[in-house]
Amino acid sequence: MTQKRKYTLDKTDKETLTKWYSLMTLGRQLDEKAPNYLKQALGWSYHAPYAGHDGIQLAIGQVFNRETDFLFPYYRDMLTAISAGLTADEIILNGISKAADPASGGRHMSNHFAKPEWNIQNVSSATGNHTLHAVGTARAMKLYGSKGVSISSQGESSTSEGYVFEAINGASNEKLPVIFVFQDNQFGISVPQRDQSANRRAAENYRGIKNLTIMYCDGKNVFDSMNTMYLAKKHIEEFGEPVIVHANCVRIHSHSNSDKHELYRDENERHCVKMSDPLVRFRIQLLHSGKFTEEELNSLDSDAKKLISAAHKKAIVAADPTPESIFDFVIPEPFVSTKYPEGIHQVTTGEKHKLIQAINETLKAEFRHNPDTYIWGQDVANKDKGGIFNVTKGMQQEFGKNRVFNAPIAEDYITGTANGMSRFNKKIRIVIEGAEFADYFWPAMEQLVETSHDYWRSNGAFSPNVVIRLASGGYIGGGLYHSQTIEGALATFPGIRIVYPSFADDAAGLLRTAMRSEGPTVFMEPKALYNDPIAETYIPDDFEVPFGKARIRREGSDLTIVTYGNTTHQALEVASRISKENGKEIEVVDIRSLIPLDKETILNSVKKTSRVLIVHEDKVFAGFGGELAGMIADEAFNYLDAPIRRVGSAFTPVGFNRILEKAVLPNAEKIYQAAIEVLSY
């Protein structure tokens, strides 16, 4: 068994003790000064005081090695950040949201400390969700043989979140080098621990999980905290399995500056926690040891005060972020095709490919192209099976279990660990099957939102290089959870690309571009077309389709149909029928890429035909077509000779019985009737 490192007052040299006390008094003075900035209307409008967590936070920062480790602090981790190396200047710049704030340039909430170049990660306000990122990073560390650990820090109440269980369950299953630190002050804002869990100590909720070690320490005690954190790190080095460090702390002040703990903690309780102040106790220990005099400690306090004063003077005159900078770092610039700048090919010989074949072969080609490419999801790597639709068939056999593997049925875990793993190195590209059916992706929405604003929130320091594959849409008799398409909801989040091919060539080209680009892309696959001959095409080698470039599938002059996915084929059928019946020529614009959107091609077509019908499989109400209609009305209204019309699903769930499904989903007949009405207006 790993022996506990013996940090004691007697055996610790004065230089180390001086460093520790200096960090602690600097942190505490900043912690107490922070509310004054808000009172003076200078910033720091969110501040969560850490007083009472001093021992464990000092220890986290001291064991963290910026060369080998990754640190995911939470919003109360001010001393953790200072102990890890952040300066008073950087803490204040973050607090008052200046452009030079190393965490986010003022984009993220104050008191969320980070320094990405040191592997101190920018984490979310969604408490505890970074546990999944820490696990994903640890997976990469293990795969690449990197020394070090991934440290996730959080309060005990956040361990009630489902994604925290998913993270710990997954880390133990994969035996990953993660230290999960629970800073337990017995309160989740005003909610006492007894209302959170049957176990008084949150770590006990995870007792019994294999390959997981739980360690306890007094988070108010510097030496016990240091010993336990070093022991946890040593345990991982020796056994390669995750550790929970549960640190008993107290919260001396309110949860944050928007909370009043006097409303739920009586005077006696507030007095008792003040008597447990770790800094006061550590100071008394140093004095009683005889190693320090009162004058020496007062001098260290004075030095910290001077540091803070100098840092304040610099930070207060530092530049603020500019209004126009809001458009910087929304999403990285994509890979640009030089071979196929328009995403159109002229190949008409050879073998046609089905849409499912195009995706499978492109995945394999890109895995050969970039050895730092990975794929996982539910049911994607089981012997000769490759997902519920066999899209990934044969991949594990060729690329091995380290690059192609199954994940638990935990969509948040699948998505969150992809975010985390991509943090290890920018060359890594990850494809995930976000859910077996798009309808099952909802549990991962918390992590999709996280992924969507990582690049913006970190001021361009990090973007998850992740492609999220979703088998989408109906026409298969699937019913609820098997027949929805969800792009309308996903399109409301800036920071992610959404592509939706209709043909095999576009499926191959868009997937290749997504996998070669930085930043997250949702790749929606119309599963009804996987094996449908109608979607088959010739595909040239190394075909690429640029984002934000629509494709005119049929030229016309009398009406524009704007569409994508399954309904592209229905629209083409209708266009052919109307041409034969009355000679009217309909232009069919397959947008292919929803975000970014090719507005120019759409508007030019509308200006040419003066009439527009928007068709998609998703619901008409609140569907993506509403955005298309709004854009056309704003920018091409003067060219219209008829009202904009939309066709899509009814505002109901998709029924399982084929009669119900047909009644809900759009089809060629519904599109035909709408097209005739627009043409006749």
Image (cartoon, grey):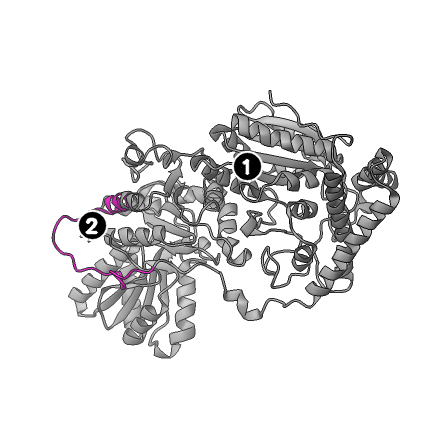
Looking at the picture, how far across and down is residue 200, in whole percent?
A: 71, 29
Distance, label 1 to label 2, CA atoms, is: 48 Å
Looking at the picture, how far across and down is residue 279, in whole percent?
A: 80, 41
The residue wearing badge 2 is 536
Taking the image as shown, residue 503 lies to the left or right of residue 334, namely left
Q: Amino acid at mark 2?
A: Glu
Does 558 sit above or below residue 285?
below
Task: Please state the extent of the stretch shown in magenta in the rendering.
Answer: 336-362
Q: Amino acid at mark 1?
A: Val
Q: Quadrant of residue 519?
A: bottom left
- Number of other residues with Cα within 10 Å of mark 1, as a class: few under 14, some 14 to 19, many 20 or more: many
- Name the quadrant of the C terminus: bottom left
Depth check: give the residue in front, 169 or 280: 280
Taking the image as shown, residue 595 lies to the left or right of residue 607, namely right
> Is 361 in the magenta?
yes
Depth check: give the residue in front, 341 or 483: 341
Looking at the picture, how far across and down is residue 127, in whole percent?
A: 61, 44
